[in-house]
Image (cartoon, rainbow, N blue to C red):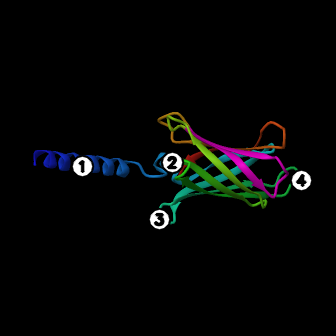
Amino acid sequence: MRRSILAAIVLVVLTCAGEGWAQTWKPFQELGFLTGSWSGSGESAGRIAGVTASWGMEMNGNFLMHTTNVVLPASEGKTEESIRIVGYYSYDRERRKYVAYYFFSTGILGTFDADLAADGSSVKLLSTQLLNYEAGARARISITKAAAPATDITFQLDLAASGKDFVPFVIAKLAKR
């Protein structure tokens, strides 16, 4: 009888401990610092740009949605241009890592694997596939937190042609609004 009671107590403790652990971690909590609206300035191909971005949870918390708008004002005979970037982050339970799907207003679609710095200071995404772009090309997105107590972030999108090194396409410093 004592063994049955002891076994029941151990089972309850283990079950509660397991439930407690499962409740302490939720997908996207490491990316919580991104949620909200951001704005700032940036650069693309040597042109100064106005940049706005936002991150927010979507579809019952199963996806983190990211939007960025880059506006390159008219200057030196160039017309105003805008670049829109929309990304959806998901947690791949099987691989136990974040993945992202990015859509660009240029018609490019990219799938990315995401890596988070152990200290939570940055998110780095590396494309696993780009559609509607040259074969073998790659893209990389880096989002880096400024050192505390600042709340700024740096957003950078780099592109690399097949067999070439990455070059910056958009670099922006953003502050939370």
The kind of residue on which mark 2 rests is Leu
Q: Which residue bears the numbered disc 3?
A: 60
Q: Which residue bears the numbered disc 1?
A: 11
User: Residue 162 at x, y = what percent?
Assistant: 84, 43
Q: Earlier in the sequence, mark 2 or mark 1?
A: 1
Q: Which residue bears the numbered disc 4?
A: 77
Segment tinted magenta in the rendering: 122-145
Q: Residue at x 22, y 50 (%)?
A: 12
Q: Earlier in the sequence, mark 3 or mark 4?
A: 3
The kind of residue on which mark 3 rests is Asn
Badge 1: residue crowd in 10 Å (few <14, some 14–19, many ≥20) = few
Q: Nearer the viewer, residue 110 or 153?
A: 110
Q: Earlier in the sequence, mark 2 or mark 4?
A: 2
Q: Residue furthest left?
A: 1
Q: Is residue 36 left or right of residue 69?
A: left
> How far is mark 2 from mark 1, CA to CA?
34 Å
State which mark lies toward you, 4 or 1: 1
Q: Is residue 140 left or right of residue 93?
A: right
